[in-house]
Image: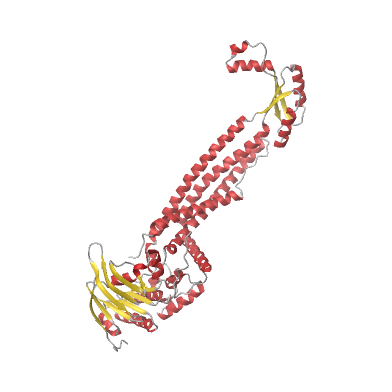
Amino acid sequence: MAVTRHSDAVAPVRSSGPLATWLTRHVSTSIGSLGRLFRQPFASLMIVLVIAVTLAIPAALNLVVKNARSISDGWDNALDFSIYLKRGLPETEAQKLAGLIEQRADVESVQLITASKALEEFKQQSGFGQALDHLTENPLPHTLVVRPGAANTSQSMILLHEELGNLPEADIVQVDTEWVQRFHAILDIVRQAIVFGASLLGIAIIVIIGNTIRLDIQNRREEIEVTKLIGASNAFVRRPFLWSGFWYGLFGGLLALALVQYGLFLLEQPAARLAGLYQSGVTVLALTPEESLSILGIGIALGLVGSWFAAARHMRRIEPR
Amino acid sequence: MIRLDTVTKRYPGGQEALSGLSLAVDKGEMLFITGHSGAGKSTLLRLIALIERPTSGQVIVDGQNTRRVKRRKIPAYRRHIGMVFQDHKLLYDRPVSDNVALPLVIAGVGHRDAGRRVRAALDQVGLLHKEKQRPETLSAGEQQRVGIARAIVTRPKLLIADEPTGNLDPDLSLEVMRIFRRFNEVGVTLLIASHDLSLIDRMGCRRVALENGRLAREEEEEGVSWQ
């Protein structure tokens, strides 16, 4: 922000208190800058639109990642358990146990993979076929693949996991989470990419606003010269341009929010249908108040930085001749 | 009020606008600087307004040596001086009252106080009834009076004017000079650059003639009525 020095107020002119002066100056300058924006509605709208789109794109992508993550968190509930039974357990016992587990309310189905079948699969897939023929006894246990019911919450999943582990016949209970973890890792990469892209777009906004303010300064060159001639400081002549940058950023941020909200509105129906097809309670996550505020904040900050660069660079060169 | 001590101003290219000029202006004085264009009148005023700095010598304004005024203190320095220009230098995108209020806005004077002072200043130049108009709807003489109102609205002790009547016909010029004289009567020091010798003769003030950046002659005329 422009730093106002109060000490250099003219001696013959009695100024009101420094804080009141500072406030009055900023309020009147901000309104003046706003009025200037509205006097050129088309040009201002174009710039605001560019800023809005540039802010909305990363915001929307971020929302997509957030939703993907929340949906895939829901998928954790649909994970299979693999129960490796203690070695030496007869196949009939294993079958009995499978039937028993299948009767649980929180379990959808149980599939028994016998030790011999598992060894057969292993021989085919591992490529150790010949070597494995030399084994005198099967080292693999029987395995039960348990698919939990869809109604499970993550709490009841933990409970199920525990109870299966406590079965006397169970050796190890494993949750098949690897692919979800991979998916999350991919989402993290995407999120990093969005942050990087958003930074580039942020630089673009700074350049756009800086260039707009530069043109504005050139158009008002005479006015700046005259004001400096009658005693305006650099801070004084800079102030309206900083406010212009502020307004561009604020309106750009507001329009970006509106664009994202509109996108969510368009997605609401298809998402509800998708959720219906999967019979799940999936809802589209909207922007939180914090996220909305930070979009506005980023817009304003970029506007101020852009106009500050332009003003600092070009204002000093304009001196009365 | 103003003291110049062997001031030389040489522009890039070697051309000398002022050569070793020494001059003193007393407090409460109304002094005319005359001379042909190129004699150094404007340069002298520009040195006082710190639009330029002398190549050598001292310029002392109201006890302050301008050499010691740092670049970032120039705005505060200028606010102590009222300035009137030949081409008025008004802002044409805003009404007369806003133009006159500009120095007060820069100084951070409150809205209500500023409004009162603006009306008082416009009243002094006889333009109170035109405060809402845009400068381009005014005549040249009226525009110059707006420029004067802007220069005096902060009640400066020193007013400098560069060819303030340069674009005006004799009647309007006299009107402007009368306004200046009224300020002088309430204690404002005035330094006016002009080449309108017949008008200056009617004013009966001290005048200093410049020629090629040097003092040509100085004369004092007492008691000549200018009314």
Quadrant hosting residue B102 = bottom left
- What's the residue at 47%, 61% (across, down)? A3
The foreground one among A180 and B185 is B185
Q: Is residue A40 visible?
A: no
Of residue A148 and residue A305, the one placed in the foreground of this image is A305
Does A132 appear above or below B61?
A: above
Rendered-image quadrant of the C terminus of chain B: bottom left
User: Relative to A159, is B136 on the left or the right?
Assistant: left
Q: How is the image coloured?
A: secondary structure
Q: Position of residue B105 (x, y in %)?
A: 46, 69
Q: Quadrant of the N terminus of chain B?
A: bottom left
Rendered image quadrant of residue A171: top right
Q: Position of residue B75 (x, y in %)?
A: 40, 67
Of A4 and B60, the residue lying toward us: B60
Residue B181 horizontal/vertical position (percent): 35, 83
Q: Is residue B16 visible?
A: yes
Could you say where residue B205 lies in the image, as x and y percent from the top left?
Answer: 30, 83
Counting every numbered tag in the picture gives 0
Q: Residue at x 36, y 67 (%)?
A: B68
